[in-house]
Image: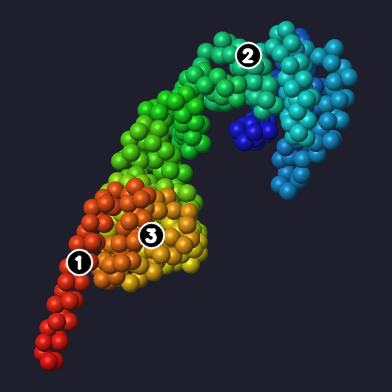
Amino acid sequence: MSAVNTILRSAMMAAFLATSASVGTMMLATPAYAQEEDDGPREPPPTRRSDTLSDRVYRVIAEVQELMNPTEEGQEPDLAAAKRELDSLNERYDTLNDFEKATMLNFYTNYYLGVDDIPNALATFERILTIEDLRPEQRLRSLQSLGQLYASEERYEDAIRTLEEWRNLSADENATVFNVLALAHYNLQQFPQSIEYLLSYMDMLRAEGREIQRNVYSLLNVMYIEQENYESALEVTKTMVALFDEGADWRNLAAIYGFLDREPQRIQTMELAYVKGYLQSEGEYMNLAQSLAGLDAPIRGIEILEDGIEQGIVEENGDNLRRLTQMYIIASEFEAAVEPAERLVEIVDDGEAWDYLGYIHLMNRDYASAVEAMQTALDRGGLENTGDVQLSLARALVELDRYDEALTAAQRAQQMGANNAGQFVSFVESSKARYEALQEQKERAIEYYQS
């Protein structure tokens, strides 16, 4: 049974049992012919009518009422004894008038619901509705109860038919009827009809000054999303955020902004949810951090991702450290990027990770470390563009005046089609020539002064 049906069933059972006492009291208002003076003889009963209880039936029903709902404090209901009394009365069913039949059968429904015998409860409500001279208020009450019970048993078409009959006969609308009709149509995936009834239900609650529960808004929201009516879903979710301020509502609001391609609002909403402490999963932290990086706010993305790692929400694995390192590079925070990049190569030890570390060292002008990391990247392999790594290696080697190695790396980059590699080969060659010329001048100067 679905969660919606479980809620409906529980609420309906509580309502039936809570109202049984009041219904019984109304039915058991002592008729004139059942009253008796203490100091005088009993008056003869009036002519039998179809809308009254005889003295004999009244006494049985009063006993059943007391057994089901004891008036004495601390006394427990005795449903089994109540059932025996009803069975005894039922043996004379054909001698009862229509009001007596309806009264007895109503107490049967209370009994069956009390012992969770739903099939017999349904059958008894159906039997009540066959009574020819059933009072209008009893017919309405039975139709509503039967419709609710059909819905709780997932007989949604029967529930809708029965409750629509109730609406045709009733002079007034009823919030509970609207609610059950909405749930029945929802379970049949008839969303337009369900939305109409649910909105009517909500309107009635507002008119009566009653609170609308969060799950009602949630159901309405689900149906709008199912219909891809995201604008309506947006308004409902904004209301939920304002009324309930729950994490799920903030996350849903961000998702709906995503459906509507309103990326700045989606990211802003997710960041507010983060500030409120409503992000719960690694995926949510990663999504927000990377979205901020893509929105030219990589520093904020780095803060959120590192906070997720520190809290243990985001696992410190290769994929996540790789993304963190990439965000540091996007932010041009090269000094701070060293630490996560070094953690990355410790975990994954692949070519790409070492390439990141080498590039970061190069940007920090730590050329010796850059050369070591880039050579390791080339050794590990699996690089997306080996030519670019060779070119970066050549740049670092030039800065260390290791021109022969730099020229070799630049030529390999040129062979692999790296952009601007040919120009860099020429640059290395000219730089080498200048360096060698300077070195030669130095040596001559030293020889001159030593001679």
Q: Quadrant of residue 70?
A: top right
Q: CA distance from mark 3 to mark 1?
A: 31 Å
- Label whose residue precedes the other's in the sequence (3 or 1): 3
| Element at label 3 | helix
Say whether residue 220 is visible. Answer: no
Horizontal placement of 198 versus 275: left or right? Answer: right
Q: How is the structure coloured here?
A: rainbow
User: Which residue bears the numbered disc 2?
Assistant: 161
Say whether residue 71 is visible. Answer: yes
Callout 3–callout 2 Cβ contact below 8 Å? no
Residue depicted at x 74% and y 16%: 126
Q: Amino acid at mark 3?
A: Tyr
| Element at label 2 | helix
Q: Locate residue 2, reporting x and y percent.
A: 64, 33
Q: Locate residue 191, reporting x and y percent.
A: 52, 21
Q: Which-is-in-front pick, marks 3 and 1?
A: 1
User: Which residue bears the numbered disc 3?
Assistant: 356
User: Which residue bears the numbered disc 1?
Assistant: 433
